Image (cartoon, helix red, strand yellow):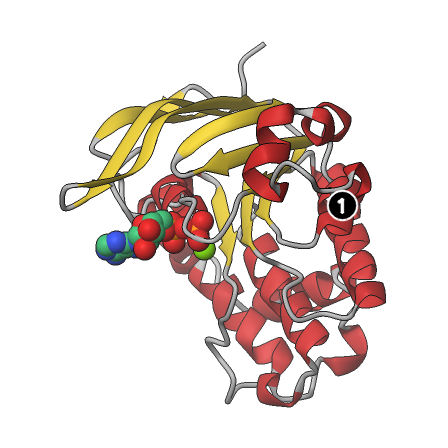
Amino acid sequence: MTALLSVRDLYKRYGEMPVLTDVGFDIPKGEIAALIGANGAGKSTLFNILGGALAANRGTVLLDGEAIGGHGPERVARKGVGRTFQTSAPYRALGVRESLMLIAAASEPAWRRMLVPLGSRPRDAADAALEEVGLAHLADATAAALSYGDAKRLELAMALMRGPRLLLMDEPTAGMAPGERARFMELVTARAAERGMTVLFTEHDVATVFGFAARVLVLDRGRLIADGTPEAVRENPEVRRAYLGDHAPTNAL
Ligand SMILES: Nc1ncnc2c1ncn2[C@@H]1O[C@H](COP(=O)(O)OP(=O)(O)O)[C@@H](O)[C@H]1O
Ligand SMILES: [Mg+2]
């Protein structure tokens, strides 16, 4: 079986400092995977490479067998990689529905817009996306007025609207209360299951990682030290050392 995302021998340095070394993994289509690791481990760097914003010094990134490494964020997005960021509010002054309508209009191919006037298509697409993330009741609010959790839902709708095959989410639930975290991740996993979408997310909250990821990848100082089921990763001695020191209780991870 071809993996949806296949990463091989990635190496990245900033100046002389290596930040990712020999990173390789495969994520099958439809899997929900978490990337964890201490601050500075290289998670954001890896996400930036996968999303096309950064080029690796060596190695390959394949999406469904096609090389996307070093192609730039816009081209990688068109190939089917969506992203949400830890902090972003791109259209705060706009209405919630309006901000989605802009994306709907912009993501139509030019030939289609020339042949058939946009008409109500952007609005219909925006309303469908709002339904998908449970924000239909806030369609007329301004984005700036949204609560933190609702802003995250809007950001998710914006990413989903482009129909990603792979969704990269950098700390999607940072700053949320525990109950809200679980509701948000339930929403993400439900939308992913419907669409057959693959998700890779970074996360500091252990309960969220082990509650929602079928697969956990652990980065430690730029190296992948574990890659497996949550249960296997939880028992991995190297992970326990890297994360917890020698004397930490088993249930801390
Ligand atoms: N643009 C940059 N230039 C130089 N060093 C960087 C840059 N971005 C990150 N780093 C360094 O690379 C390492 C990995 O950072 P990062 O990928 O942000 O890790 P994480 O997201 O896991 O916290 C850190 O030591 C960080 O200081
Ligand atoms: Mg980071």
Q: Residue at x 72, y 62 (%)?
A: 128
Q: Is residue 72 above or below residue 126?
A: above
Q: Secondary structure at mark 1?
A: helix
Q: Residue furthest left?
A: 15
Where residue 134 appears, x then y in whole percent?
A: 80, 67
151 left or right of 8?
Answer: right
45 left or right of 207?
Answer: left
31 left or right of 87?
Answer: right
Where residue 110 appears, x then y in whole percent?
A: 36, 55
Where residue 68 appears, x then y in whole percent?
A: 33, 32
Q: Is residue 24 above or below residue 42?
A: above
Q: Would residue 84 be seen by someone viewing this image from the given angle? A: yes
Q: Quadrant of the C terminus?
A: top right
Residue count near mark 1 (Cα–Cα under 10 Å), binned few <14, some 14–19, many ≥20: few
Residue type at mark 1: give it.
Answer: Ala
Q: Residue at x 76, y 45 (%)?
A: 252
Q: Quadrant of residue 21?
A: top left
Q: Residue at x 58, y 57 (%)?
A: 171
User: Which residue corresponds to mark 1?
Assistant: 252
Q: Quadrant of residue 200?
A: top right
Looking at the image, in which quadrant does ligand 2 appear? bottom left
Q: Quadrant of the N terminus?
A: top right
Residue 224 vs residue 235, the one in the foreground: 235
Q: Is residue 79 above or below residue 66?
A: below
Where residue 159 appears, x then y in whole percent?
A: 55, 56
Q: Would residue 74 be seen by someone viewing this image from the given angle? A: no
34 left or right of 79?
Answer: right
Q: Is residue 251 above or below residue 29?
A: below
